Amino acid sequence: MIIDSHAHLVAPPAFYGYRANLLASGGYYKGNPGVTDEALAKSAATNVATMDSVGTDVQLLCPRPFHQMQSEKPDRVVHWWIEANNDLIARTVAMHPNRFAGVAGLPVCAGSPVTDALPELDRAVNELGFVGVSLNPDPYEGRGNSPTLDQEYWHPLWERMVELDVPALIHSSGCNSGRESYSEHFITEESIAVLTLLRGEVFTKFPGLRIIVSHGGGSVPYQIGRWQAEVLAPNLGGDPNNTRFEVQLRQLYFDTVLHNPLSLELLFKTVGADRCLFGTEKPGSGSAINPDTGASFDDLKPVIEAMDFLSQSDRDLIFEGNARSVFPRLKIDG
Amino acid sequence: MIIDSHAHLVAPPAFYGYRANLLASGGYYKGNPGVTDEALAKSAATNVATMDSVGTDVQLLCPRPFHQMQSEKPDRVVHWWIEANNDLIARTVAMHPNRFAGVAGLPVCAGSPVTDALPELDRAVNELGFVGVSLNPDPYEGRGNSPTLDQEYWHPLWERMVELDVPALIHSSGCNSGRESYSEHFITEESIAVLTLLRGEVFTKFPGLRIIVSHGGGSVPYQIGRWQAEVLAPNLGGDPNNTRFEVQLRQLYFDTVLHNPLSLELLFKTVGADRCLFGTEKPGSGSAINPDTGASFDDLKPVIEAMDFLSQSDRDLIFEGNARSVFPRLKIDG
Amino acid sequence: MIIDSHAHLVAPPAFYGYRANLLASGGYYKGNPGVTDEALAKSAATNVATMDSVGTDVQLLCPRPFHQMQSEKPDRVVHWWIEANNDLIARTVAMHPNRFAGVAGLPVCAGSPVTDALPELDRAVNELGFVGVSLNPDPYEGRGNSPTLDQEYWHPLWERMVELDVPALIHSSGCNSGRESYSEHFITEESIAVLTLLRGEVFTKFPGLRIIVSHGGGSVPYQIGRWQAEVLAPNLGGDPNNTRFEVQLRQLYFDTVLHNPLSLELLFKTVGADRCLFGTEKPGSGSAINPDTGASFDDLKPVIEAMDFLSQSDRDLIFEGNARSVFPRLKIDG
Amino acid sequence: MIIDSHAHLVAPPAFYGYRANLLASGGYYKGNPGVTDEALAKSAATNVATMDSVGTDVQLLCPRPFHQMQSEKPDRVVHWWIEANNDLIARTVAMHPNRFAGVAGLPVCAGSPVTDALPELDRAVNELGFVGVSLNPDPYEGRGNSPTLDQEYWHPLWERMVELDVPALIHSSGCNSGRESYSEHFITEESIAVLTLLRGEVFTKFPGLRIIVSHGGGSVPYQIGRWQAEVLAPNLGGDPNNTRFEVQLRQLYFDTVLHNPLSLELLFKTVGADRCLFGTEKPGSGSAINPDTGASFDDLKPVIEAMDFLSQSDRDLIFEGNARSVFPRLKIDG
Amino acid sequence: MIIDSHAHLVAPPAFYGYRANLLASGGYYKGNPGVTDEALAKSAATNVATMDSVGTDVQLLCPRPFHQMQSEKPDRVVHWWIEANNDLIARTVAMHPNRFAGVAGLPVCAGSPVTDALPELDRAVNELGFVGVSLNPDPYEGRGNSPTLDQEYWHPLWERMVELDVPALIHSSGCNSGRESYSEHFITEESIAVLTLLRGEVFTKFPGLRIIVSHGGGSVPYQIGRWQAEVLAPNLGGDPNNTRFEVQLRQLYFDTVLHNPLSLELLFKTVGADRCLFGTEKPGSGSAINPDTGASFDDLKPVIEAMDFLSQSDRDLIFEGNARSVFPRLKIDG
Amino acid sequence: MIIDSHAHLVAPPAFYGYRANLLASGGYYKGNPGVTDEALAKSAATNVATMDSVGTDVQLLCPRPFHQMQSEKPDRVVHWWIEANNDLIARTVAMHPNRFAGVAGLPVCAGSPVTDALPELDRAVNELGFVGVSLNPDPYEGRGNSPTLDQEYWHPLWERMVELDVPALIHSSGCNSGRESYSEHFITEESIAVLTLLRGEVFTKFPGLRIIVSHGGGSVPYQIGRWQAEVLAPNLGGDPNNTRFEVQLRQLYFDTVLHNPLSLELLFKTVGADRCLFGTEKPGSGSAINPDTGASFDDLKPVIEAMDFLSQSDRDLIFEGNARSVFPRLKIDG
């Protein structure tokens, strides 16, 4: 079975019209997303067709990250919007229960305690049957004040995730810095997420926590030499007796949303096949056609199948096995 | 000949005491670096010995980037400090004219026009005989307001660099964001530099401009699939008829400061050997001993020599030829 | 003929999905509104049917004000959005050229010079055939720094409007103050617009300028006693020889979007029928059914027709004549 | 008996010299208001003469609102000043106990808890014998951060007012926004006060609370059609089953400080005579002579007496009865 | 003849009531100071009596500094107030032309160019006959951004003062820092004024400029050892060949408002009798009775007369001669 | 015995290189000061030689104040640096236990509670054997927000100092205001410290507290007439029955770091010899050679010995006795 662990809700355009209304209304009028079953069925069917075209059996759907707007005010606008996303995902899953499962957006709002997001986490898992969460590590969306993932700010979330036995897919949202597009900011935030998680004590304090880093871990696998050396260098705060960086790195999981064979090879060889989950977010960042191959950049299944240095067991882990371990609440049979 | 294009001044500790004095004095007292010839000769000799130990013939020396403090106020403190760095580099070069050449720091100050830095650029090239510049693309040092490299802010600098026929090594300085260490910020800023340079019209307007991106280009070569697809995707602002990203990328040069064989392989195969300059910044970020090899992470000459997929001509370009082309003012004979 | 001078584009929901995309994309991807002719024809037809149901012959369409987002950054997001609105209005007008005419949104962006909006003003009038503009007097959208209408900031706009012979409908946009909904802010900004225009020298410097204030002039007609007294009171900066406030007030025009008979009566008696333009913005703020009448609050034609104190000539001015004078570019025959 | 419920202390000019001293001294020197009995007697006599000239029997005196300066720092300057105002009112009342009663200013300071003002409220009612309070709903004075009246911030004040059985006259103070004069800001703040009080749960939680809105309720009675429709419109956050806006509005009281017959008529017909209190704040905003009548704009008694649509019982309520109900601590016999 | 070069307008309290009105009105209503000739004559007579009681023949009157409010906004409030002060001083001088002369307040407004103050300077000298100016070196009043006196900001003022041949008395105004009272801030600002004037090139560029520093020069004469050493110390930016600090200091003038014999002795011996002007600002900071002497602290004439180390010529300079030189426009005969 | 109570660590230049590293590293790498015993012994010997040259027996060493950087972020950088200073002082004392004693720097960080500094206070006294503390009253270093010494913020520190029986030497650190050099800011902050301590209730609440003000008390002894009068003047917040200022002032101690005989004379005569501690901070602010004497400005022992108005007992107190009382933990025998 091929499980795409990094996929996003495909919603009718009107759903984003609702988002525009929420923002323009400034939190005074909640209104209604107004997505009919008919419109949703149509967009869901399109998605299933896309999956079929590349051989994906199951997609784990979370909200479109760059639309999550966790830095907008007042907070209730964010809550309403994230809830509407999770509701729409749940309706989509209900239409195709063997092809989709839900990964919840979380209303972690810039400047507010993370505990504000826990009721929606509970609702998504316990009422809507979701199997994981999508987590934006930068609720300020590029304005620079978000607490890094090693800080105490996040502890209540880690604790609840462990209790509910759900993992988080790290994926930032919008970017208002004026220096990066949201897409470029994704990579920056994933790098910060990896490095701050590893230098803190998160995995010591929350041993049951499972974190997947999107897009192959940002810059970290490529820049690993830098961090391997630093961990061991006394003049840079390291120690020759420290746990080596490449070992620390394997506390995390990574998806394969890299759209490039050489990069995937680097990823698998650096973190190991047992830490990688198949992901394409198709349709999404890689759906353009690669003129060299005639296939889309995000058609990664044949790419991975063609890699000689991977064993069949490696491929099974990447395509399905790791997702089964990391998302134990996922119950779709193979 | 082995030319290390990315190396930093090794100064006696008292030199940084001078930096501390400048900052503490708030720009009221300029004082004097107070580095004696004797002390400098000692540190220069140490550096030469390090070079000899790994087979480097020539190092291109620029100031220690993380000490550049371009966001400190008043501006004159930055000017005094950068000038003192360039002076010390010039004295070091004068002690070993066949082993070192100077790459100038630039006093581009947060919130001030880039033209303020041009007199020091002129002095460094015309009076001190420097062959290139080190350029911090984020003078605000992580506080978020620096103009990106595609903006008009930088045009006067590009113009003067072309006139003087010197390249820039992109390398950020400190980081005060509270979310990244300066070292992590290097990677972020290099990625932003590459992506903003390519989406702007800098190379169209300044065709003679030469830019080297430190540390193998940040995250970009690893994340290239993302940008290849985006450039061609109409829904992401792209166009199937656009120049492909991997071609655009070859407008830039990259150094090899990656400290990891797999990453170097990815870099060479992605951007081509003719765009890569040997660099180790030894002693620096990679000088810890790799327990697996017993050599330091930054001992990259044997790593590159051992790569079968490179031709001898490729290696010659990486070790020397590209540096000769990019730094035409470099006059040390082989 | 019944001309509704204050009406807004009725667009398919997907159009606002485009707005959401623009915002989330941070100005990096312009994208495409993606409104098909079919979808637009459907929404236009709905609008025409609404007009028919209440006897409106012509509507002057401007963008939905609360969606105008002039305080969003970067500016190009605002420009793209306003242009898309004007384009969609033009397409709607083209579908029903005897029932609609265009009133342009203007990309006056918070913190940027008003001259940035003039190219779009020119395009709307000269290329798209629009007959007036909708003007948000608070581009900062409730954050408090917008220059008031008596300040020099606005002069280039007044000048160009006079040259093009088009009037402005004053209508604010969103509100981010946290103290008012956008709807409440409309009233506040209309009051500020009236009072600042009258205390400045705008009409002396731009004698050909024509300004219509939405929603019956905010609070001003109701609070007129306060301003009548102030204008004449030396201890409040007035002078008994000043032009009386009620005379000054008649330099402006007002629409009838008040949804309440007593308020309309106060308006007509205070400013005169020759300064009032029929407006309902139907469907809009007053479309709820009034349980007392069974008609919608914004079904104002019968309300005005029933007012004994108005002459037939008064009614003709309100329903059509004043609009003809104020919008001389309006060419739909009666 | 004619009770003017909205009147302000007439103080000798030197009293405001004290205010200037407090501000200039920055809170370091408290000093002394220095108003002699002789000077105060003179100004009080002037006030009584003014009352006699228009047939007012009793005035309820509160501090001059635009001088209240609740946004000045440090807070102690505000406390000293408000206390001095209340003291001076008490002295004035003592001089003419049958003509005046006190309505207390409150030192609610921008950014400080409302509880800081409660000791002065207690002192004014229990020690000075005051019968109500004047409440500035915008302690930040136009700088935009004041909590609206529906927020919990204000609960301790509502609670104490109910315990003491005193009402509040809503009346804002200065304005530093640069967009409105203090006088224009009064109207804006009254509108915000009405709308936020009605959309919150204040009257449900504090059923004994009595609030009078100055100047005829800002813009709300005139713009009522807008709010009537919104309350019933589902797409604007309303519901056809909601309590109708005009009913909600009658939870509040309003004064007659409108200076214009048509506006008074609109007010009485909209909220009902039983919710209106006679007020003129004479001498004040309406004391200029109306050239059309030869009387001052604020000579409202004959205006109201001439209104045919009011019954005698209505007039009695407006002139006296409502004030008796709303200010039960007022003990002056008719 | 005894000339008190540092004295302030004694105005009726109502004048400061006008100041309060200006501030509260936010610049919307200019109003009128409302000081009658009768009231002014009374306060002027009081002042003359005070002068007679201590033997002062002439006072040079400037506005009360701590009331100058140069940091208030909008600027026009400051202009109106300073102009009103200068007008009142001119009226006072006109009442007693042989006892008073005018020293003008200047509307140098925080954040605005100093040239804005020049029209009032011209008016004061050319129309009102004033002989000098009072200069607040900290228009931001303790909020920290005022340009120091060595900066170019002040050049237009120096230039005009030289043209008009008038000196400036350095005297700061209010203080909003929360760390100092306005009175304590006077001393701080005088110290900063002395030190910045001496380290800049003001007296080189404007050789005809004459500056008197209030209150005996702040802390500088007492702390002179520190600055004498610094000027000569290379490691503190000095040079043994520099002009010695005590010589530089004599480019300035100082008044005697120190209220303490030992301090006056230190001042005279440090800067020389030829640089000191008799000043008491009586009635003012020193008017309390000294229990040890039974005289007020500011009764300085007998204190100076009793100093043996001064020659008669020294005393003549202090009491009259230096004032004659520094204020050449002063024409009162002895 | 001659005890210099105000002296600073003389450290090798490399120690300040460590400071530069800490700042540039942004708190990510603690590193190591790297001061060898050999280098420290050399600088300590230089210091002893300096003491011998002017007859000083003992110096109480605290960190160089202008390097203390309490406003830098993150706080841990400040803590690491202050701890390193105290460690280096302890090592210096250990090398010359009869010539030096330690006075601790305190990591009071801008914006953080003073209690954060108490562990280092405890360590310095209990583990390192220090005898007092050096206290910067302006942790914001000229940016304007530091709580003054009369505020509750400081109470936990006063309490612990009393428990440990150690005094504080008031001495500010750097200055970032752009208006004063750090050296000028010292004088400003000492003046503020004196005046705020005296107007608050610190000595009433902490009767055992001992405070020494550096540099002869800033401006206060020279400006004493001003404060003597204010304390007694009702219109300035005083009272004729108040404790006189000169008596209040004697609750504090002062050092003699004035470098000028006349100023020292003023100090001794104003506060009394029993409140003055010999201090020179040699080598430091006064070490330049006075061309008039041929001695350095800070060679104060002969200056004081030559003062006729002091008794031998006075001199003993100044040179040793007062230090013994104020620093009871100082155990070096005479």
Image (spheres, coloured by chain):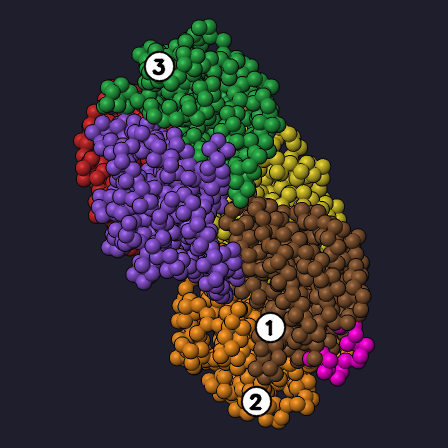
Chain colours: A yellow, B red, C orange, D brown, E purple, F green
Question: For residue D287, which numbered disc appears in the image?
Answer: 1
Location of the C terminus of chain A by quadrant is top right
Circle 3 — which element?
helix
Q: Are marks 1 and 3 in contact (CB under 8 Å)?
A: no
Q: Nearer the viewer, mark 1 or mark 2?
A: 1
> Can you tell which quarter of the image residue E252 is in?
top left
Q: Give the total number of marks visible in the rendering.
A: 3
The residue where tag 2 is placed is C317
> In which chain is the residue bearing label 3?
F
Element at label 2: helix
Q: Is residue A21 left or right of residue D131?
A: left
Indicate which disc residue F305 carries: 3
Residue E197 in picture, x, y percent from top left? 30, 41
Residue A331, can we see it? yes
Q: Which residues are magenta?
A: D303-319
Whether residue D97 is situated above or below residue B141 in the rendered picture: below
Q: Is residue D51 above or below residue E74?
A: below
What amino acid does circle 1 point to? Ser
